[in-house]
Image (tube, grey):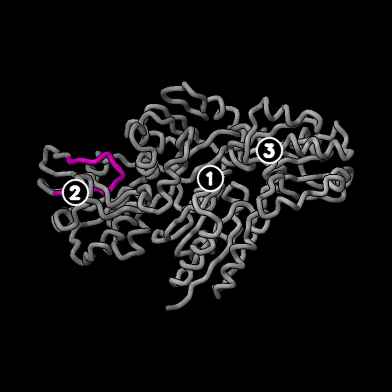
Amino acid sequence: MKTGSVIFVGAGPGDPKLLTIKGKEALGRADVIVYDRLVNPLLLAQARADARLIYAGKEAYRHSLPQEEINQLLVREARQGNVVVRLKGGDPSIFGRVGEEAEACRKAGIPIDIVPGITSGIAAPLYAGIPLTHREYNSAVVFLTGHLCEQNAGMEIDWAAMAAVKTLVIYMGVKNLPYIRERLLTHGMAADTPVALVRWGTLREQQTLVGELATIDRQAMEAKFSAPAIIVIGEVVRLRDALDWYESKPLFGLTVAVAASDPLEQGENLAAVLESLGADVLPVPVAAQTALADDDALGLTDELERCRWLVFGDERQADFFFRTLREQRFDIRRIQARIAALGEATAEALESRGLPVERRFAANEPPAAVYRNLPLAPGDRVLCLSRGPYGSVTYPDGVIWRTATAGRLAWIDAHPAAPLLQARTFDWLAANDPYHLEGLAQFAGTGWQERPLLCFGEETAARARAMGWKQVVWCDRTARTLAEEIRRCLQPGDIQMYEIS
C-alpha cells in the first residue's frame, strides 16, 4: 500500500481569513484532518466532503487525546495511504509541539510538510492596537511561555534577563500571572510598566485589559479574565489608545451568518461590507440542489413534454434547469415547448446552451403580464421556472399556468464540518440574494422566522417577507456610511421592517 504523508498546517490566531493560501490548499487535499481546540470551525469547511475530521484538542488537565496517542494517530493514518493534515492553532512551531509530532513521523518513515501560520503572539496584540515593535520604545521582543510542562519544569526562565527586555509577549500565562508579576518586579522591572491582556484575539469575543505590572494580576482577577489570552508587557502597550482599530469598529462584537458559495471568499459583497464594519461574518456554505422531490420541484417527464411554453424567471433557474437535465439524463431534443425568458441575461444563458428564446420580457415582469403577451390557445399548459411562490393557476380560457422551481441553493448539511458550523452562535442572518434565503433558513433551523435578517436589496427583502420572516432590515446601498444606521437597527428588540436608504 502506498504510504501517505502528514502536513502540519498553522491555522492562524482565529480569524479564518488569516489562514495562508498554502494552508488552505493543504486542507483541500486532506483525507484526514486532525485539529486542535482553538482551530476556527470555519477552516474545517475547507475540507473535502469525504474527508474525516478528528478532534485532538487539549485544555488544562483535560486532553481528548494524550500527545503520544496523537503521534501514533498521525503515523497510523499516513501508513494507510492518507494525506493527513495536522491543523494546529497559530503557528505550529510556537509552543505547538510540531517538533515532537514531526519527529515521530520522520522516525516512522512518513513524509512531512510544514506550513507556517500567523502566531497569536503577533496577531492578538496587533488586533488590540499594539504593534510589538516601535523605534521609540524598543529594538527587541521576547516570546515566552507562562506555563511550564512537566518535561521542562526544571528549565526556569531567566527572569532577571526578562526584566531587562523592553517588550515581552507571554503565551499561556493568565493562570500564572501573579507569579510572573512577582518575578519581574523582584528582578527590577518598573511597577508602572504597561501591561495588556488580549483574550480571544482576532475574533468577535476579543477582550483587552490594560493596566500596570504592579496591579495587573488583581485587575485580571476582578475582571474574571481567563484564558486563552496573550500577555504583552512593555511601553508599546501605550500605543493602544491611538491605534485601537478593531474593537472600535461600529459592528464589532456582532456575528452575522451570511450565505456563501466559498466559506472564505466573499469578495465585494454583503459579507465583505459587514466585515469591513467590524462584524464577525459566519459564512454559511450553500450549493445548488436540483434533485428535488417535493411538490414544488420540476417534474421533467410530466411537464416538459406537455407544456406549450417554458418560461424561465431568471438566469439561475436556467442554470438549475440544465443541471437537472444532466442529472436525469434528459435529452434536450425532447423539449417541444417554446421558450420565453425574463431578462436579457436569462435569455443569453439559455441560447448559449442551445435553447432558442422566442419571447423576451423585462426581468421583473409579473406573471399576469407574461400570460397576456404569450400566444396561447385555450387549454395550453405553461411551466414557469421561478424561485416562487409556487403553485398552479387555471385562467378562464383554460390555460394552466404552473410555477415550479428547477432547483434551489441549499445549506450543505452533509459536509463533515456542518455540525461544528451549526453549533456556532450568531446574532443575525444576512443575504443579498433571494436564493440565499432558503439555505439560511435551513441553517438557522427551527424558529428561523424569528431570527432577525439583514437584506441588501428590496428584491431579497420582498422574498423574505413572502417566506414569513418577521424581522427584516433592508438597504439598497453598501457604503460604509451605513454603519451607524445599521448598528441602530441591529439591536435586540427591534421588530418588523426597516428600510435604510
Q: Nearer the viewer, mark 1 or mark 3?
A: 1
Label annotation for residue 174: 3
**Which sits in the foreground, 136 or 318?**
136
Question: In what element is the residue under mark 1?
Answer: strand
Q: Which residue is mark 2?
A: 382
Residue 487 image-quadrant placement: top right
Estimate the x, y position of residue 275 in percent, counting from the top left.
58, 41
Look at the image and say whether residue 482 sits in the magenta stretch: no
N-term-proximal mark, 3 vs 2 = 3
**Which sits in the foreground, 304 or 330?**
330
- The answer to whether the residues at label 1 and label 3 have Cβ atoms under 8 Å apart is no
Q: Nearer the viewer, mark 2 or mark 1?
A: 1
Magenta range is: 381-392
State how far apart marks 3 and 2 are (Cα).
69 Å
State how far apart marks 1 and 3 are (Cα).
18 Å
Look at the image and say whether residue 385 sits in the magenta stretch: yes
Amino acid on which disc 1 is placed: Arg
Please say whether residue 407 is visible from this viewpoint: yes
Q: Quick check: 271 left or right of 185?
A: left
Q: Quick check: 141 left or right of 484?
A: right
Q: Nearer the viewer, mark 3 or mark 2?
A: 3
- What residue is at 46 percent from the left and 26 percent from the top? 498
Looking at the image, residue 342 lies above or below residue 214: below
Estimate the x, y position of residue 202 in percent, counting from the top left.
63, 43
Label annotation for residue 62: 1
N-term-proximal mark, 1 vs 3 = 1
Please say whether residue 245 is visible from this viewpoint: no
Estimate the x, y position of residue 5 in percent, counting from the top left.
52, 70
